[in-house]
Image (cartoon, coloured by chain):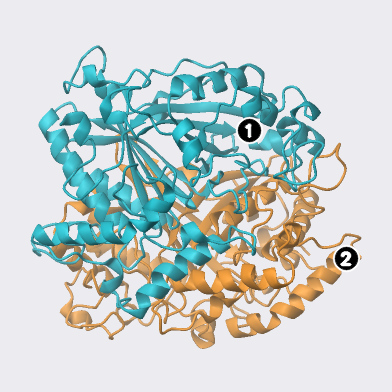
Chain colours: A orange, B cyan
């Protein structure tokens, strides 16, 4: 299902979801209703927020269509959070399954996760909420998002190689269902990976325009998973660095350059089919309509970069810093003349023309996690890329970049993970991973 | 100067600032103008953003006055960022002065910082910008906020006890000017302070509605200070937990409870004078109109809290979780009946009625810094409180809370710092710390 269809399906999916909740014996609770945002208030609180959140990122003369609703539909042929217009903030968590968990407990958790995810992405509380239920029992929802709109929250799940086989053990009877494309990533030149920030049996990508909503979602899923999974590592992203809406203002990364100028548009169904969605027959059935996610924590040597001349900075990217125009061009979106750039310029090396038309869908976020022991900013890019087959996309691209990219003087890859993100949950009652475990 | 006056002075201050920049031989560069947001675009990009950023946090029937401008005036009798309506995001940095720095180099840096702060809070780039100047030289601005509005950025400076005397040494000839109120904070019961997250010779509090703008500001000040100061520690806050605009929706902390219901309003000049601003004759002249800032990194035992019953959670605070009403009342803003709460309830112990009318201005933010080695969320409250005299405000209050607060089972103070924040910079040409060093 493309982005346009997702928009059209929003209402029906929400209705179906509400019906499912109701048939489970609970009235669905809108977080907004709790604080009196019903009726006209919803229009201001939901549509108003979305449209102006987009305005902060756009030129005046471009429409803010994708952000016009504060709820992104959870149900659909593809998972949301991939082709969805990139939200402003991120909380990403990688989980390991506990040593005591079984296949059954894992399935039970995935069913509960799905129900909670459908509620939270719809702006509703988990279960009976944060302030109702038995006073003697802990509330179902932790409550810190109570009163906040859905803020375009999306929750996207992925399964890591170690879920299928870990230390030679097939813990959950899934080994035969592991996609060939879900490889253990090779070591790339220059990698300096921290195992504490790499890998994971499962992942959840939470994106929202309000970080409190994204953090709330990860926390409540972690809480539901208590005893079955533990958070292995997590990453907060404070600003998106890639856009999947080409007519929006392109965000800037921590090096001050526009990032993602030439990205796959979330509405470009042809390019999505060609580069992002796994196609029938290419791998196991459960991955058809899914996508492979590579996550890389890329630390930037900020202090060194900041002492580098403007010319060197522009040579590194092959674009001007202010406008973001390719060398020899005047506007950001002018088609680049790659030969006008230095041979080792990042944009030249990464461009589809230099890679037989190869494209990945980038969805990265800037991070800063304070300062390291030497007083240097621990900051950079949390790179997220979705693709149809990692072996034919991120791997050859990164091998090329790792070997030659002038940018390598200023960055280091310090975390890495790879996940198979299955197709979407099509309707209430289905659950994350059903086709894999079912 | 109260908040209302600050609003009125916005235009004149901005004009004066522009004049000062121009007379320094540079045309002031608006970040928005660079990407073509001039003219009508400014109205949308500035006023539009501010007013709806506020709408996400408020009930529909309350005006969004304080957020109606995207620029908060930098110049004024008091520093902005104290009585200013609390922005959505925080980047806080504590700096130590380098061992090789002198009083002169420190003064030079403070002058440069002031100029950069006036530019950035006005939505302009530092110096000649990120994409102009000599190609052979590093750009004056790092560029990642290029194209973003000022987002109500405020930058607030404070001076720590160690600036005045460190290990018995008066490094900068300031010892005699140390305010008596700028005490070394006593150890409180239950403190488990990490020296790597405590103290600091100086601090900068950067608040903005866009975290990229706040991070950009700290980074550019750190860069200007290179060789003179180093970042000792820093803290990112992703969501405000206190409001200083009483008619706005009260934000919730990571425990899911409304926080700051009974805070000092930024427009209440009488209460600000009584509880927040240092008065003439109470300390050194350079602190008149300033305020004392206590910063505490308060880690919450999230996983324990989340397993606690609703009744226990409400008993801890003495308020209901959903509405935030005091025990025995029905609405959040109903005056509490403290006797209806458990004797060790947080709100009862912290309430002015229990403390001879004592009040502090709270300006805290939720944080989450990933997970610790045991897979637990490293999350909680970065508590910021401004007061007229710490000895008569935070110290007795925290002694009381540390001794008896039921909340202590679920939190731990892991970082602590104390700063004297001087009066405001009144006009262009003056600089941060001028009255202290001058």
Q: Which subunit holds the residue at mark 2?
A: A
Compared to residue B191, the image places residue A297 above or below, namely below
**Could you give the CA–CA distance between mark 1 and mark 2, rounded to whole angstroms?**
34 Å
Residue at point 64%, 85% (across, down): A5
Q: Is residue B145 left or right of residue A20?
A: left
Residue A218 vs A271, above or below: the answer is above
Residue A317, quarter of picture: bottom left
Image coords of residue A366 (percent x, y): 40, 57
Determine which quarter of the picture holds residue B300: top right
Chain identifier of the residue bearing label 1 in the image: B
In the image, A41: left or right of B32?
right
Task: Name the residue beneath numbered marker 2.
Answer: A22
Task: Give the quadrant of the C terminus of chain A.
Answer: bottom right
Q: Are marks 1 and 2 on the same chain?
A: no
Label 1: which residue? B301
Find the residue positioned furthest to the top. Answer: B168
**Callout 1: few (<14), some (14-19), or many (20+) C-alpha neighbours within 10 Å?**
some
Question: In x, y percent, where is residue A95?
Answer: 61, 48
> How many marks can you see?
2
**Residue A184 visible to an observer of this rendering:** no
Identify the secondary structure beneath mark 1: loop
Q: Residue at x 50, y 83 (%)?
A: A274
Residue at point 46%, 15% (across, down): B186
């Amino acid at each position: 299902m493309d982005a346009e269809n997702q928009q059209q399906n929003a209402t029906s999916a929400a209705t179906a979801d509400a019906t499912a909740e109701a048939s489970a014996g609970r009235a669905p609770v809108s977080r907004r209703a709790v604080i009196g945002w019903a009726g006209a208030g919803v229009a201001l609180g939901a549509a108003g927020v979305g449209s102006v959140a987009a305005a902060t990122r756009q030129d005046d003369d471009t429409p803010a269509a994708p952000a016009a609703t504060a709820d992104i539909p959870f149900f659909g042929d593809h998972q949301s959070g991939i082709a969805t217009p990139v939200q402003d903030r991120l909380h990403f968590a990688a989980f390991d399954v506990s040593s005591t968990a079984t296949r059954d407990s894992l399935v039970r958790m995935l069913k509960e996760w799905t129900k909670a995810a459908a509620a939270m992405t719809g702006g509703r509380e988990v279960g009976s909420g944060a302030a109702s239920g038995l006073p003697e029992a802990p509330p179902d929802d932790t409550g810190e998002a109570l009163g906040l709109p859905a803020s375009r929250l999306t929750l996207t799940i992925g399964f890591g190689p170690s879920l299928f086989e870990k230390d030679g053990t097939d813990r959950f009877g899934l080994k035969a269902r592991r996609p060939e494309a879900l490889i253990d990533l090779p070591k790339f030149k220059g990698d300096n990976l921290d195992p504490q920030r790499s890998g994971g049996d499962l992942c959840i990508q939470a994106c929202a325009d309000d970080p409190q909503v994204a953090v709330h979602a990860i926390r409540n899923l972690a809480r539901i998973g208590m005893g079955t999974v533990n958070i292995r590592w997590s990453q907060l992203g404070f600003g998106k660095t890639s856009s999947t809406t080409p007519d929006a203002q392109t965000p800037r990364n921590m090096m001050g350059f526009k990032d993602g100028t030439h990205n796959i548009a979330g509405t470009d169904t042809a390019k999505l089919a060609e580069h992002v969605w796994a196609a029938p027959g290419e791998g196991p059935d459960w991955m058809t309509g899914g996508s492979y996610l590579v996550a890389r924590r890329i630390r930037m040597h900020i202090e060194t970069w900041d002492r580098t001349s403007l010319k060197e900075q522009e040579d590194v990217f092959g674009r001007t810093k202010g406008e973001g125009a390719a060398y020899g061009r005047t506007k950001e979106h002018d088609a680049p003349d790659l030969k006008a750039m230095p041979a080792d310029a990042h944009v030249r090396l990464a461009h589809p023309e230099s890679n037989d038309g190869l494209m990945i869908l980038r969805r990265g976020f800037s991070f800063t996690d304070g300062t390291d022991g030497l007083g240097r900013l621990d900051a950079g890019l949390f790179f997220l890329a979705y693709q149809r087959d990692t072996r034919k996309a991120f791997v050859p691209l990164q091998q090329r970049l790792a070997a030659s990219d002038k940018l390598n003087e200023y960055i280091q890859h310090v975390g890495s993970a790879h996940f198979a993100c299955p197709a979407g949950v099509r309707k209430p009652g289905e659950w994350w991973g059903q086709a894999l475990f079912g």
